[in-house]
Image: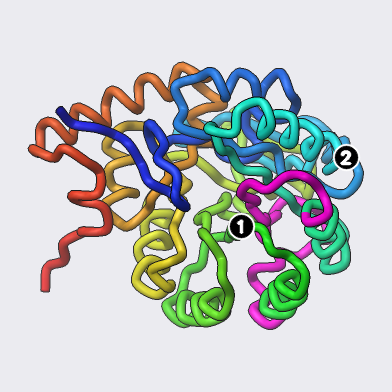
Amino acid sequence: MASLQATFYGHTYENPFMNASGVHCMDTAELDGLATSAAGSFVTKSATAEGRDGNPEPRYVNLELGSINSMGLPNLGLAYYLEDAIQRQTAHPDQPFFLSVASYKGFDEYVANMKAIQDSAYTGLVELNLSCPNVPGKPQMAYDFEDTEKLLTEIFRFYTKPFGVKLPPYFDFMHFDKIAAVLNQFDLKFVNCINSVGNGLYIDDETDTVVIKPKGGFGGIGGEYVKPTALANVRALRQRLNPTIDIIGTGGILTGRDAYEHLLCGASMLQVGTQLYKEGLGVFDRLNSELLDILVAKGYNTIAEFKGKLATLD
């Protein structure tokens, strides 16, 4: 009997699917929906120290092949998600999830947020979002390799709980080499790649205008548009990272086949963003069914039998 069970940081999940942070995770009610859905796990909204309203509307638009957004990190503040996480961890210790944390102000806020988590009763996994591409005037931390190394060095001075990092897409082999060289210095539990492809532009063919308001219409691209880039990042980083660092594959997962390809490239867990936004929580039932059908058709009993075994034409 084929199984979709996924092993990640010492826990076995019923399947590898999760939401991507930012989709269906703003408040406790939405998180409750994820917790009772067919997803194997879930992640909270990326939290800043204080709550934020985010960028002006319209800031998210569904497109034929994906989406464009410039959300601006709307969230209810770290204290809200941390309190919720502690309660969930206490009530359901056998159902681990991910707490996502970000920064609007840069280095010092990242450090302060991680200190707050370190000092709390929450002991679960944290996703440190180093890729926030849609905040006007703010750079992405993970595109600065020296600052990323400095930040992780500072965090590891005091942080003793398990965490990983969420990365933007990289587009050059030299950049894959450089970010892997930085990350391999640290006892990270996972890397999540990719966040949306930053600063895309979409034009309405009837009005000849951009479709979102912030940043003059520039925004992060997600969905089907980004799958090849996401697969390349999963594959390239799996080839370069320490084997103890798991990979979460994110980007362009619309079907079970898309999920299969992420796993084939070396992902251990999978996050769904744009398609979850478009389809709702039922997407996880469908993806599970489609991925299981692929395993059966190919004669696999477990994900481990093919994970990371992408063939080349050498």
Answer with left or right where residue 280 lies relative to residue 267: right
Which residues are the magenta region? 118-146
Q: How far, Cα to Cα, is label 1 from label 2?
A: 26 Å
Q: 206 or 284: which is nearer to us? A: 284
Q: Do the CB atoms of the residues marked 1 and 2 lie less than 8 Å apart? A: no
Image location (x, y in percent) of residue 182: 57, 79
Regarding residue 209, the answer to whether it shows in the image is no
Disc 1 residue type?
A: Pro
**Quadrant of the image containing the C terminus:** bottom left
Image location (x, y in percent) of residue 154: 77, 75
Q: Residues within 10 Å of mark 1 (few under 14, many from 20)?
A: some
Report the number of numbered marks: 2
Q: Residue at x 75, y 26 (%)?
A: 27
Depth check, mark 1 against mark 2: the one in front is 1
Q: Which mark is residue 145?
A: none
In the rendered structure, does residue 167 fall within the stretch colored magenta? Answer: no
Answer with left or right where residue 306 lies relative to residue 149: left
Disc 2 residue type?
A: Arg
Q: Residue at x 42, y 45 (%)?
A: 269
Q: Which mark is residue 52?
A: 2
Q: Main secondary structure of the magenta part?
A: loop
Answer with left or right where residue 64 lies relative to residue 195: left
Q: Residue at x 34, y 71 (%)?
A: 239
Image location (x, y in percent) of residue 97: 58, 38
Q: 142 or 150: which is nearer to us? A: 150
In the rendered structure, does residue 145 fall within the stretch colored magenta? Answer: yes
Q: 260 or 94: which is nearer to us? A: 94
103 above or below 21? below
118 above or below 294? below
Closer to the N terminus: mark 1 or mark 2? 2
Image location (x, y in percent) of residue 275: 48, 30
